[in-house]
Image: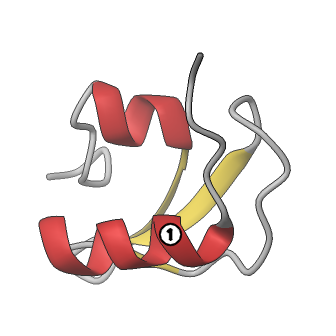
Amino acid sequence: MNKRWTIDEIRHYVETKTDAQLLSTEYHGYSQKLLFKCACGNNFEKTWTKFKTKKQHTCGEC
């Protein structure tokens, strides 16, 4: 069974394991796109699944 993530757990993961920043304040499930800020300063959207498991931690320009 998959772990159910909270927005605080996602924020902690992003802050400690990537150079991105989480801008979203709510999380309602794996298919919801979250708003992130890339290390280059661009904002981008990804689902939590793509961000975490596919390692898509940057915007489309990086």
Around disc 1, counting alpha carbons within 10 Å, would you say few (fewer than 14), some (14 to 19), or many (20 or more)?
few
Please identify the residue farthest to the top as the structure is shown.
1
Above or below, 62 relative to 36: above
What amino acid is labelled 1 in the image? Answer: Glu
Residue drawn at the location 65% of the way across and 70% of the way down:
7
Question: Can you tell which quarter of the image residue 12 is in?
Answer: bottom left
Q: Nearer the viewer, residue 26 or 59?
A: 26
The total number of labels drawn is 1
Relative to 55, say whether 60 is above or below.
below
The image quadrant where one finds the N terminus is: top right
**Coloring applied to the structure:** secondary structure
In the visual, does 46 lie left or right of 57? right
Left or right of residue 28: residue 13: left
Residue 19 in the image: x percent, y percent? Answer: 15, 74
Circle 1 SS class: helix
Where is residue 60? Give x, y as percent.
Answer: 31, 44
Q: Nearer the viewer, residue 23 or 29?
A: 29
Which of 61/22 is in front?
22
Residue 1 can be seen in this image: yes
Task: Please report the residue visible at 15 percent of the width from the left and 66 percent of the height from the top.
Answer: 17
Please name the residue that numbered disc 1 is placed on.
Answer: 9
**Residue drawn 80% across the image and 71% down it:** 26
The answer to whether 36 is drawn above or below residue 2 in the figure is below
In the rendered view, would you say 37 is above or below 31?
below
| x then y, percent, for residue 18 | 16, 66
**Observer able to see residue 18:** no
Among all residues in the image, which is located at the extreme right?
28
